[in-house]
Image (tube, rainbow, N blue to C red):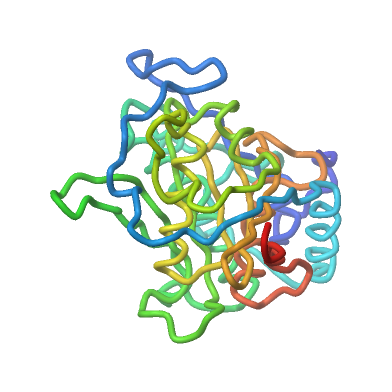
Amino acid sequence: MEDECMVDPTVLTSYLRQAYLPPLNLDESLPPVQYFAAAWPPIEELYMDQQRLIRRVLAIPILALQNAVRLYYTGFEKRLRVDWANTRLTLPCPGVTMLTKQGFAIQTIKCEMGFLGALEFFVLSTAAEAVRTIEKRQFDEDELKFVRLRVTSVRSTKRLWTVYSFGPQHAPTSPLRPGIAIIAIPPWLMGLGDMQEFSSRRVFAENELDREIPGNPPWTNAMKTWAMLYDSCRVSGYRWFVVTSYQYWIFGTWSAEWSGAQVTEPVPFDKTVGMTIVEMLAFWIECARGKCSWWRIAADAPQGS
């Protein structure tokens, strides 16, 4: 992290480079996770009658990505000014702003709704406001806000998982739709081991991600996350995505024909060297919206792979 005396509190890029995600204080009633979380119960809605096309997962080199992020923000120099009457930049930043009383209260997590509230208050609010500042747009533009979507069972109103969408909410009108989807999974349901398994390079066999095959090992949490992510992004048409437990963040893209994906390793919430989480998230949103050409979507898997 840069020395605090170098921070210009009126410049957005300086703030994003120094802003940090405060740690969450998980209530002792929540299940502890050492490395892998306990296996999730079966989610019948993930077993498809149609084929999921993904065949290959490749890695995004984190150093190359950090370089792209740095070059992107360097291009703005000191042209993006911050008004500190703006309460939507909620992340604390040394030498600029401190964690508020409201922020201290939100840090304590007792349930999934508290987790989602902290994610929205600390990270999503700040990233969305950064994008609006970069694009010189107004807060009341619906397309430039995160929308929380409850994925529910077709048989009941039971919520299956939570997706945040940033982009057009109407039906897709083009194959490559500008926008990003974020799958948010509480840290007591997704440990570092699960995140590492999810982000590992791999090749999916045909039908492997369509349904659990009798006689084969049951799907892991990481496999279920891939199915959840695929379904969420196919519905929205977004090729850019994030999977997060707040404690760790994975940034990724789908290929044009959905057969390939490329993801980063899990990035810890307190990363400050090379890039911060909020810098990365704002950058990823701008790439997804077609406003930044420093990164591209994944390549399709070769036929027959």
Q: Residue at x 52, y 22 (%)?
A: 36
Where's residue 175, x and y in %? 53, 81
Q: Nearer the viewer, residue 266 or 273?
A: 266
Q: Nearer the viewer, residue 207 or 132?
A: 207
Where's residue 277, x and y in %? 65, 46
Q: Quadrant of the C terminus?
A: bottom right
Give the vertical position of 62 relative to 248 (above or below): below
Give the vertical position of 72 relative to 242 (above or below): below
Q: Nearer the viewer, residue 93 or 253?
A: 253
Q: Residue furthest left?
A: 156
How many marks the image carries: the answer is: 0
Q: Quadrant of the N terminus?
A: top right
Left or right of 229 in this view: 149: left
Left or right of 209 in this view: 305: right
Question: Which quarter of the picture shows residue 303?
Answer: bottom right
Q: Residue at x 65, y 47 (%)?
A: 203
Give the vertical position of 192 relative to 231 (above or below): above
Q: Residue at x 63, y 51 (%)?
A: 251
Q: Nearer the viewer, residue 43 or 63?
A: 43
Q: Residue at x 75, y 51 (%)?
A: 60
Where's residue 288, x and y in %? 61, 69
Q: Residue furthest bottom?
A: 173
Give the vertical position of 35 relative to 166 (above or below): above
Left or right of 96 in this view: 169: left
Where's residue 68, x and y in %? 82, 60
